[in-house]
Image (cartoon, helix red, strand yellow):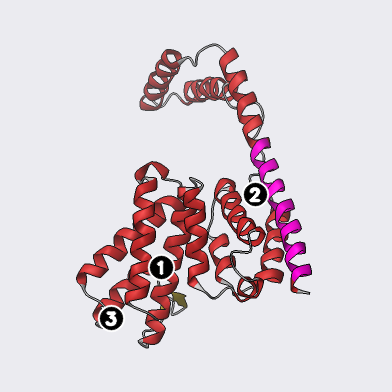
């Protein structure tokens, strides 16, 4: 039965990846078409806009409201002419999101770490890389299917991150590693009886950020200031990846991050 479920998961995951790739291709095609339209146009009339802006400023200064309306209308007309003709497609339609959410719920469970990791990704390229990593692990039998269903073993995620890194998907790997680290901080807090939530100004309980968990763990004596600084640096790389700042770190830095987080988790088990 496990084999049937596994094959079903592989087929469904492959279809989801193809769908995301189609969305990305559609976006790139429209961007290319818009670029072609832009190239065929005359250059944006910067000098004319500067002149109109100055005329508008003077009209406002002298309270000539008829002239203000006229200049604002001229500026708007020019800017409208230079907008993209074809609107970009929705990058992640709600129906696609719901289908993928349902897949993770059925295969991994709605409280699985893999679902939480995927939910944090904010671009289709990262989503495709992440799902490809799971697909490759399934196809190569690198982890038992029962472990994928439970989704509770950290090494699986770090193995996935290493695979993505080996395939040059450094950005998806950085997100996964950073999220594994954040989950480990939570488990250390639970072990030390540190609350995972705090109340806002309205008294509503909200989950603590990783930086707050890091500070609390130092205050509780779980580790020292040096480890605190390392954790902050590691989380910064993860945040850069999650927010698309891909030029702020290298593949080699992500490889060092992977080893450092492995060592940290081994040295400070939860």
Q: Which residue is mark 2?
A: 92
Whether residue 35 is visible to the viewer of this picture, yes or no, is yes
Dot 2: within a 10 Å radius of its alpha carbon, few (fewer than 14), some, or many (20 or more) residues? some
In the image, 201: left or right of 131?
left
In this rendering, the answer to whether 191 lies above or below 214 is: below
Residue 176, image x and y in percent?
48, 60
Query: Which residue is the site of mark 1?
Result: 181
**Residue 8: which quarter of the image?**
bottom right
The residue mark sitting in front, 2 or 1, is 1
In the rendered image, residue 17 lying in the magenta stretch gets the answer: yes
Mark 1: give few (<14), some (14-19) or many (20+) Cα within 10 Å. many
Give above or below for 128 relative to 233: above
Residue 235 appears in the figure: no
Residue placed at 61% from the left, 19% from the top? 36
**Disc 1 and disc 3: Cα gap in Å?**
15 Å
Q: Position of residue 133 (x, y in %)?
A: 58, 55
Query: Residue 135: percent from the left, percent from the top?
Result: 64, 57
Q: Secondary structure at mark 3?
A: loop
Residue 219 against residue 101 in the figure, above or below: below
- What is the x, y in percent for residue 89? 67, 39
For the view shown, which residue lies furthest in the left direction? Answer: 225
Instruction: From the image, give the main secondary structure of the stretch colored magenta.
Output: helix
Residue at image mark 3:
222
Distance from Cα at disc 2 to Cα at disc 1: 27 Å
The N terminus - image quarter: bottom right
In three-dimensional space, the C-alpha distance between marks 3 and 2, rounded to whole angstroms, equals 41 Å
Residue range highlighted in magenta:
3-25
């Amino acid at each position: 039965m496990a084999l049937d479920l596994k094959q079903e998961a592989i087929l469904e995951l492959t279809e989801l990846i193809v769908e995301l790739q189609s969305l990305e291709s559609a976006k790139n095609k429209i961007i290319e078409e818009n670029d072609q339209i832009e190239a065929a146009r005359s250059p944006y009339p910067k000098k004319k806009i500067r002149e109109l802006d100055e005329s508008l400023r003077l009209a406002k200064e002298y309270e000539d409201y008829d002239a203000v309306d006229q200049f604002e209308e001229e500026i708007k007309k020019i800017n409208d002419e230079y907008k993209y003709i074809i609107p970009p497609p929705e990058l992640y339609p709600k129906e696609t999101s719901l289908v993928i959410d349902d897949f993770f719920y059925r295969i991994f469970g709605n409280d699985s770490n893999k679902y939480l990791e995927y939910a944090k990704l904010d671009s289709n390229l990262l989503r495709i890389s992440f799902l490809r990593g799971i697909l490759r692990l399934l196809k190569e039998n690198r982890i038992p299917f029962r472990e994928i269903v439970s989704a509770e073993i950290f090494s699986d995620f770090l193995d996935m991150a290493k695979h993505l890194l080996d395939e040059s998907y450094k950005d998806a790997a950085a997100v996964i590693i950073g999220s594994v680290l954040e989950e480990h901080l939570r488990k250390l807090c639970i072990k030390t009886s540190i609350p995972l939530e705090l109340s806002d100004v309205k008294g509503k309980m909200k989950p603590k950020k990783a930086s707050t968990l890091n500070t609390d763990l130092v205050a509780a004596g779980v580790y020292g200031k040096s480890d605190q600084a390392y954790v902050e640096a590691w989380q910064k790389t993860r945040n850069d990846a999650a927010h698309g700042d891909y030029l702020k770190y290298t593949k080699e830095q992500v490889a060092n991050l992977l080893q450092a987080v492995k060592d940290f988790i081994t040295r400070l088990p939860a």
